[in-house]
Image: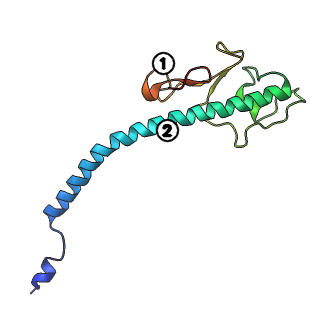
Amino acid sequence: MMRKDQREAGFTLIELMIVLFILGLLAALVAPRLMGRVGKAKQKAAQAQIQMLSTALDLFHLDVGRYPNSEEGLKALVQKPENLPQWSGPYLDKGLPKDPWGRDYMYKFPGEHGAYDLSTLGADGAPGGEGENTDISNYQASP
């Protein structure tokens, strides 16, 4: 026969269910707030990467005397284009980054808003949008 101390040593099913309910409730309250922060962090990462790419493009311009054309694209920052003896790259230490959503940055030269246009379409991958879907570029104010 079991002693009374041994039977009361564990948790009952009701106690475990109450704990799981409380944890689920906390997760339901906290998760939406964290998800919003992840989206903002990705936007800030995209802004920082666009600034880094802009700096690399300016270094390319200083060495070569022009920005990469649209055909050469951002790839010219990491691989030497043909017939450019002044190229002193690579201009990016860790290769060409993808945007925080896993897509290539869009580069256009000559640009419609400046010497060149450099942008990403945000989380939805479509032009326009609000919040996490906001387009981020070198010619627009930060979202």
In the rendered view, would you say 76 is above or below 4? above
Say whether residue 75 is visible. no
Q: What residue is drawn where x is 72% and y is 20%?
A: 70
Image coords of residue 112 (percent x, y): 65, 12
Residue on which the image places disc 2:
41
Image coords of residue 46 (percent x, y): 57, 33
| Image mark for residue 128 | 1
Residue lying at the far right in this picture: please name it: 85
Question: To which quarter of the image does residue 68 belong?
Answer: top right
Q: What residue is drawn where x is 75% and y is 32%?
A: 77
* SS for callout 1: loop
Image coords of residue 22 (percent x, y): 22, 53
User: Between marks 2 and 1, how big is the CA–CA gap?
Assistant: 19 Å
In the rendered view, would you say 130 is above or below 93? above
Tell me the amino acid under the disc marked 1: Gly
Tell me the amino acid under the disc marked 2: Ala
Position of the N terminus, as image quadrant, is bottom left
Q: Residues within 10 Å of mark 1 (few under 14, many from 20)?
A: few
